[in-house]
Image (spheres, helix red, strand yellow):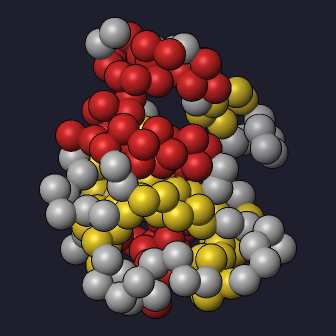
Amino acid sequence: MKLERALGLLREVPDFPQPGVVFRDLTPVLADPDALRAVVDALQVHVEPSTQVVAAVESRGFLLGAALGYGWRYGVVPLRKPGKLPAVAHRVSYDLEYGAASLELPEGAITPGQKVVVVDDVLATGGTAAAACELVERAGGVVTGVSVVIELPALGGRAHLTGRQVHALLAV
């Protein structure tokens, strides 16, 4: 399946999680095996060859990161919401398009010098991706790039990732 066809399966859900927000739902893409393969293969194209680990952002980033890690033999580290990890190395709080949140990195999951790509489904305001990069770097990892399926350029997320390699499969 071609990437364009796969991305055509994305669903827009208006007024979720709150009025005025249009949620880009990746579920139809994930549910279609050929579409999932096309998206993960397209994400891989932009991963720096020296990368060793995928830092996958909760929760849809987990699905993409796990597929990417398995397919190309990277380790996968989940970046979780607070209260989900038994041992936390670092926590970063940040602003979202519609509120605030925090991410945590599991203790011992990233070692100093490891090359890490950050993977998520959407780049909106950039807070989540910037927090993910900060978590990786606090652990001593080296961020090789940020890869997402969808970017919402009108929300200016790249401005929070200045100097980083950012790759989006689709800008809407």
Q: Compared to 169, does 1 lie above or below?
A: above
* Horizontal side, residue 130 vs residue 114: left or right: right
Q: In the rendered view, would you say 46 is above or below 140?
A: above
Residue 43 in the image, given as x and y percentages of width and height: 32, 40
For image coordinates 22% across by 46% down, the residue present is 46
Whether 114 is drawn above or below 57: the answer is: below
Quarter of the rendering containing residue 97: bottom right
Closest to the observer, 44 or 71: 71
The residue lying toward the viewer, choosing from 152 and 148, is 148
State the image quarter where residue 50 is shown.
bottom left
Quadrant holding the N terminus: top left
Left/right of residue 44 with respect to residue 94 in the rendered view: left
Residue 77 in the image: state x and y as whole percent.
52, 64
| Total labels drawn | 0
Q: Quadrant of residue 95?
A: bottom right
> Residue 71, how many percent across, how many down?
36, 38
Q: Residue at x 52, y 76 (%)?
A: 109
Residue 82 visible in the displayed image: no
Q: Residue placed at 45% from the left, 78% from the top?
A: 110
Can see residue 71? yes
Q: Quadrant of the C terminus?
A: top left
Task: Check the image and report above or below for 102 versus 65.
Answer: below
Picture coordinates of residue 133 (x, y %)?
Answer: 43, 74
Looking at the image, the residue that sits furthest to the left is 49
Q: In the shown orientation, is residue 140 left or right of residue 101?
A: left
Q: Residue at x 46, y 88 (%)?
A: 139
